[in-house]
Structure formats: structure tokens, C-alpha cells
Amino acid sequence: MHIKKGKGRLVIVLPLLDVVIKIPLIQGINFLIGVWKAFVGKTYTERLLKIDTENVYFRGVLENWREFTFWNHTQNPFLQPTYFSFFGLLNIQKFGKPHDIKDTDLLYQIQYYTKWFCWEHIHSFENPSNYCLDDEGKIRIVDYGNPYAQKVIERFGKECHEGISTTFKDGIDDAHWVELQKIGIEYGKFKQKKTLKS
Ligand SMILES: Nc1ncnc2c1ncn2[C@@H]1O[C@H](COP(=O)(O)OP(=O)(O)O)[C@@H](O)[C@H]1O
Ligand SMILES: [Mg+2]
């Protein structure tokens, strides 16, 4: 067992049980006030957002809850399955093995298979530690609570899961870059090319 800290959650990793437990990092006394106020809105998500418009205090709770509902609704093959959520306060997700793809090789492939749409929420997609290997050795995403990222995954997740290779090694060579530019032009995302080569 070991513990990892993400941007909004603490993750207890239990490889022997083949699960991880995700617990939101709670920010300050406002959380307690928020819990009390949360019983006024319509849906659970709306209630949380109503009293946390900046998405600060409940970020981890919301991401947990959205991960659970998104997996349930879509069962998208690019998602590491989320088995259970207790109102976002505690999530149980399938454990994924770490991968060792270099960040530039991963980013290249993500841009390629999402046709650059990963830029709709690049924070979810650019961080290599947001991915793991599934039982077949394919790449899946573990951090998918953001609504913009979810739209991209709904559209391109299948291609990402099928296409991303753990042995790909030319993420910044010129031939691949030209290919990526073509896709960028085709999908109207060309102007963001500078982010790949700095
Ligand atoms: N299903 C999983 N299997 C293995 N490790 C995981 C899993 N989910 C999360 N982790 C580890 O915990 C870290 C934080 O989890 P993450 O879902 O990215 O939370 P945050 O939204 O707080 O960044 C990840 O970067 C990863 O190292
Ligand atoms: Mg993360």
C-alpha cells in the first residue's frame, strides 16, 4: 500500500486488492459551511457548485462524483473503471499499473488521437501521472472528473485506448510533427502547435 497526492485528492493505492481509494482534499472551514448549505439545490452536483462557484473547496468531491457518474454512463474503454462513490467523499477505482512513456511521446499521441481537442482541458491530459496501464497493458486515464475533459473522452476515448502505444518514441521528430500539423489544420486547432515544441 502507498499513498499518492494529486491536485485535488489523496489516493490510497492498494495493488493487492486491485483498487485505489480516492479521498478529496478538503480546503478549510468553508467545507463544513458548504456541506450545510448543500442541501438547498437541485441535484447533488448543482448543490455543491452553488456554494462553490470557483470550484475550490469541493473540487475533489466534484471530481470524484463526476468520475463515478461518467464511468457509469459511458463505460468508455479509455477510462480506468470507477466502481463506487460515496457521494464523492470516497471513491473506489480499479488499480492501474504505472507506465513509463515519456511525457512528450504521450502528449504527441494524445494530441494525435484527440485531433488536438485535448487542449479543451489540457491539464487533465498533459500530466503523465494521470494515466495508467490496464490489464491488457493499454493506456487508460485515471483522472477524468473534469467536464471538458469528459467531452473529449466521449468523442475520442475509444481511439485513444486503441491507438496509444507504450513503445512509441518519436513524439518530437519532424515527420510526426508534420503529420500532427495536418490534423491541426484540418480540425482548426493549428494555432496551438507551439506547445509541442518549445
Ligand atoms: N486507478 C489508479 N491506479 C493507480 N494509481 C492511481 C489511480 N488513480 C490515481 N492514482 C495515482 O494517484 C494520483 C492522484 O490521482 P488523480 O486521480 O490524478 O487525482 P487528482 O485529481 O487529485 O490529480 C495519480 O497521479 C496517480 O499517481
Ligand atoms: Mg491528477
Image (cartoon, rainbow, N blue to C red):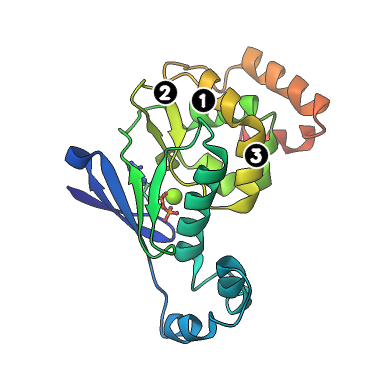
Discs 2, 1 touching: Cβ within 8 Å = yes
**Mark 2 residue type:** Lys
Residue 181 quadrant: top right
Mark before the other along the chain sequence, 3 or 2: 2
74 w.r.t. 42: above or below: above
Q: Residue at x 17, y 47 (%)?
A: 1
Q: Earlier in the sequence, mark 2 or mark 1?
A: 2
Q: Amino acid at mark 3?
A: Val
- Residue type, label 1: His
Rendered position, 164 above or below 62: above
Residue 185, x across and y down, in percent = 81, 26
Residue carrying label 2: 138
Count neighbours of disc 3 (C-alpha within 10 A) and say few if under 14, some if 14 to 19, many if 20 or more. Answer: some
Q: From the Cβ of disc 1, is ligand 1 less than 8 Å away? A: no
Q: Which residue is label 1 attached to?
A: 161
The residue under label 3 is 152
